[in-house]
Amino acid sequence: MFKEIKEDFNYPEMEKRILQFWDRENIFHKSIQIRKDAPDFVFYEGPPTANGRPGIHHVISRTIKDLVCRYKTMRGFKVERKAGWDTHGLPVEIEVEKELGLDSKAKVEEYGIDRFNAQCEKSVFRYKKEWDELTRRIGYWLDLDDAYITCSNDYIESVWWILSQFWQKGLIYQGHRIVPYCPRCGTPLSSHEVAQGYKEVSDPSVYVKVKLEGKENTYFLVWTTTPWTLISNVALAVGEGIDYVKVKHKGEELILAKALLDQVLEGEYQMVEEFKGRELEKLRYQPLFTFVKTEKSRAFYVILGDFVSVEEGTGIVHIAPAFGADDYEAGQKYKLPVVQPVDLKGEFTSEVIPWKGRFVKDADVDIMEDLKRRGLLYKKGDYVHTYPFCWRCDSPLIYYARKSWYIRTTAYKDKLMTNNRKINWYPSEIGSGRFGEWLENNVDWALSRERFWGTPLNIWICNKCDQKRSVPSIKELLDSAIEDEFLASFKRRINLHRPMIDQITLRCPHCDGVMRRTPEVIDCWFDSGSMPYAQWHYPFEHKDDFKKRFPCEFISEAVDQTRGWFYSLLAISTLLFDQPAYKNVIVIELVQDKEGFKMSKSRGNVVDPWEVLEVQGADALRWYMIWVSHPWLPTRIDKRAITEVERKFLSTLRNTYSFFALYANIDRFNPSKHKMRVEERTELDRWIISRANSLIEGVIHFLDHYDLTKAARLIQEFVTEDLSNWYVRRSRRRFWQSEETKDKISAYLTLWESLVIICKLIAPYTPFIAEELYQELCAKVSAEFPQSVHLCDFPQASEKWVDKKLERKMNTLRRIVILGRAARNRAQIKIRQPLRKMVIALPREESEEDLKPLFDLISEELNVKKISLWDAKLQLTQLLADPNFSRIGPKYGKR
């Protein structure tokens, strides 16, 4: 007996029951085990950080990954799915700082690095239970028991090995340059981290008069949006070939770019002199501020810079080498002093007496007032532009001259771009556009972080000869370490984190000096990008496992990972093995609320995934997220829309099954006891069989090309229109027959086969309802069937049963019915009122001979007694001229 599903069917309760079945029968692991000798389909799980609760946006990424992995499994591949956890970095540290009430690096050091890192280690798995439960509840099959963890000694050792490989190739160096620096976190950031934190802000737009030395009443007019950097000004830059002018204006003589005169000056002016930028080089000026004592002969003159433009500002750029990349490079060229009266907290030092201890951006207003009081402020306004903020603590970054460790990724720019072209991006424009352009503008990877909870940079430096050494393994570390009391305890309980690792010293092989580790940790994005190797503890273990599983076939994460995980994976694999780490990637756009706004706690529009899961269920949410829009387009989450999708698709499928179950139970029909060849069945049966096989072809085509949404829409159209709205509706009377006729058995078998095909097609999308229906249709019917739909092979289309001519013919018939209904509606004649005659004009590709056998179906659908085809001699239309008298009157009226 087939279980009949009631109208008040509870999807969440059904899903929980299926979860228990999967757990009890170990279905996930069986799905891998039965394919132990099959070819591998390698998938990499991007590691989330579990120090926060998962949100609705995590459901879509996990659904996509689960869908592809389930599909590939059913297509005959062995698909192992190893979970992973990203456990290092600023996200964790900031969370712990808030809990402990620590608001600076100094406070952390005062609290104790060992105690702080111990709290970080506890914090990273605080919400692991919630993550595991959501993963399980939405049906995402993932090996959570054997996850890779980025803070483990094994993982760190593999990362050290990678870094030592880069060191040996000369790709890691220490440089003093301008870095994007977070004063709140007290550490530089890499370019890909900076790219994730831009916001639109309004900054001061300030035009400042800088007095030309030796000339009364003559000023360079300079523009800046960072008044606080004027404290550190040491030069002015002009463009060598740009036209500049000196003008009389309001009793003063001002020098600026000719092209910007009318844009900048307020009021009338009189041209005095015109010259090229090169003629201004070496002219001296009076400094705006003298808080920091600077040798005057080395500063305060005009230099040339190819970065100067006349697109905005005045064509004269103020130079502060401590706070800008172009400024720093120009300063190196002209040997300018680096004036840096700003500490690591982003506050002015004691030298800047009026504003000492003030955060630099907070001092902008007072600095402008000071310039105004001294008559040096020409004008001020607001400048709206994008500005980088820390991607984790949300503090504004400052560009700051620091010593940092870098990876020379620019040396591999061409290889990075070549390897990127080997990757299939979905959509392709992300790979060629957003990601490709990012690689085109590649800068060296700022590797080091002046923080605490992270993989320690494995470089030791001699205190005497400055010799440097990158240690690749724990064994080499212990073999080279200076024996002392601490080392003995370290060997008993190895912990590669700070501060323990900081106490390990090495004997310098070049002199009698002592080598100590450089204090920095590394960018946590390097951790996550190392997962293809470190998840296997490569090369120390599992060498064969790694080689079989590199590169991977598929990854998928949100679009912001183009500057994050996608980049770090590609950069590390290119520098290490000169090949991409992944072959196919689905990029996921933002999840929005129903109005199209980004979800945020401050806006109050965040949707709790559990609210949806406990009401509509996981299948409805999964189907909605894939069906409603392509993953690379924004997905709007609307609970009512999810309910509507559940009603249109899942309920239609459920009702179709219920119709079958109701009559199959009455007739005690068992599909395993009946056989009937397709060619023996009715034309309507052969049509739905053909459509089902065409559907299989289409779904496989789209899923093989990672177009999950088009495949879903094909399935939904088949279920709602072909199967339910046409085949079942047109076949109802066949099931009502009292006798077990050949026609009735044909209808039963055809509907059962169609439902089984649908169960298998939707299994990757909606694994719960697929399992529920499969259990009733197959598993309980006969022991010959696999135990679970997820242990089945994906359906294969049979070309033998695809009849395109029949499909086209039935499609024409259905179009006729739709047009007939529309004609009745226009005439306001209801279906229950019979009509004497209907005239049809057939498309050219259809013949009367093919369609006439189906006229009875049309008659029944439209309640007409007679159907005739349009005779070309019979005129159905009449052309009438409708003159426009207002147009033809003036022209032809006299005639």
Image: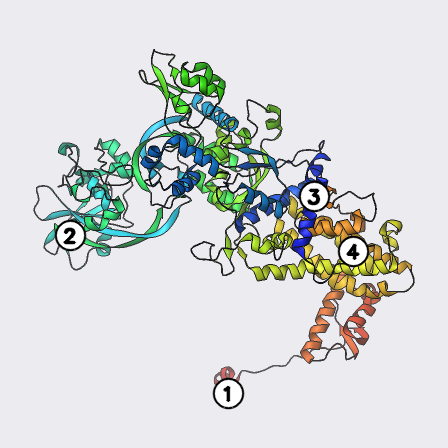
The kind of residue on which mark 3 rests is Trp
Q: Quadrant of residue 241?
A: top left
Disc 2 or 1, which lies upstream in sequence? 2
Q: Quadrant of residue 263?
A: bottom left
Instruction: Return the mark for residue 817.
Output: none
Residue 315 seen anywhere in this rendered image of the structure: no
Disc 2 or 3, which lies upstream in sequence? 3
**Are there few (<14), some (14-19), or many (20+) residues within 10 Å of tag 1?**
few
Q: Which circle, 2 or 3, is nearer the viewer?
A: 3
Image spot of residue 805 (x, y percent): 78, 57
Q: Helix or strand or loop: what does disc 2 sit on?
A: helix
Which residue is at the far bottom?
894
| Residue of label 3 | 22
Q: Helix or strand or loop: what does disc 3 sit on?
A: helix
Q: Which circle, 2 or 1, is nearer the viewer?
A: 2
**Who is closer to the viewer here, 25 or 336?**
25
Q: Between marks 4 and 1, how big is the CA–CA gap?
A: 81 Å
Disc 4 or 1, which lies upstream in sequence? 4
| Residue of label 2 | 372
| Residue of label 1 | 893
Q: Between marks 2 and 4, how big is the CA–CA gap?
A: 84 Å
Image spot of residue 311 (x, y percent): 29, 50
Q: Given contact means CB atoms under 8 Å apart, are the residues at marks 4 and 1 in contact?
A: no
Q: Between marks 2 and 1, how big is the CA–CA gap?
A: 78 Å
Image spot of residue 233 (x, y percent): 20, 40
The kind of residue on which mark 1 rests is Gly
The kind of residue on which mark 2 rests is Lys
Q: Which circle, 2 or 4, is nearer the viewer?
A: 4
The color scheme shown is rainbow
| Residue of label 4 | 3
